[in-house]
Amino acid sequence: MIEPHAASGIMYWRRSLWNGFRCRPVLLTLENGRFRATDRRGDVVFDLPVTAVTGRLSRLGTLLLTLDGSRYDLVGRGSSVSPRPSRGQVEALAAFRARTGSAGPRAGGAAGVVDLAFNDGAGAVARDWRDTLGAAGAALH
């Protein structure tokens, strides 16, 4: 049986507004009421109850999250110089989806024409995560 709020996907943790090298892929998972991110090496960036997540979606499609007093800016895709997801992240994503039957955080939204043309649909990815986390109990607006 599929857990109603199980989701996993790769987003990019924008650690600098101007330096694309500092925009890093993170594997996000939401399962059993916990929201977790792991980096390219498999190290845990954060792991906490989804109900402890607060934040909002910016007008430009950045998911601005506050977790345990720290802010994380997550975007749907990295820059041209950002590292790509590691093989371990891609394999862990596939294993999660196979195990849970989850297709990802798709909340039913679609990318708009401008988002597709200028941002390769990255805004829709952030919006879908906002909606998924909100449905699971995060305080997002």
Image: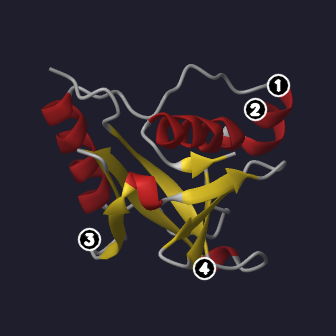
Residue 140, can we see it?
yes
Where is residue 29? Give x, y as percent: 33, 50
Question: From the image, which quarter does the C terminus lie in?
Answer: top right
Mark 1 nearby-residue class (10 Å; few <14, some 14–19, many ≥20): few
Q: Find out whether the residues at labels 1 and 3 contact each other: C-beta distance under 8 Å.
A: no
Which residue is labeled 3 in the image?
42
Where is residue 136? Give x, y as percent: 42, 39
Which residue is labeled 2 in the image?
116
Which residue is labeled 4 in the image?
22
Residue 3: mark:
none
Estimate the spatial distance between the alpha carbons at disc 1 and disc 3, rounded to whole Å.
35 Å
Mark 2 nearby-residue class (10 Å; few <14, some 14–19, many ≥20): some
Which residue is labeled 1 in the image?
113
Q: Find out whether the residues at labels 4 and 1 contact each other: C-beta distance under 8 Å.
A: no
Q: Earlier in the sequence, mark 4 or mark 1?
A: 4
Estimate the spatial distance between the alpha carbons at disc 2 and disc 3, rounded to whole Å.
30 Å
Q: Nearer the viewer, residue 47 or 76?
A: 47
Q: Find out whether the residues at labels 2 and 4 contact each other: C-beta distance under 8 Å.
A: no
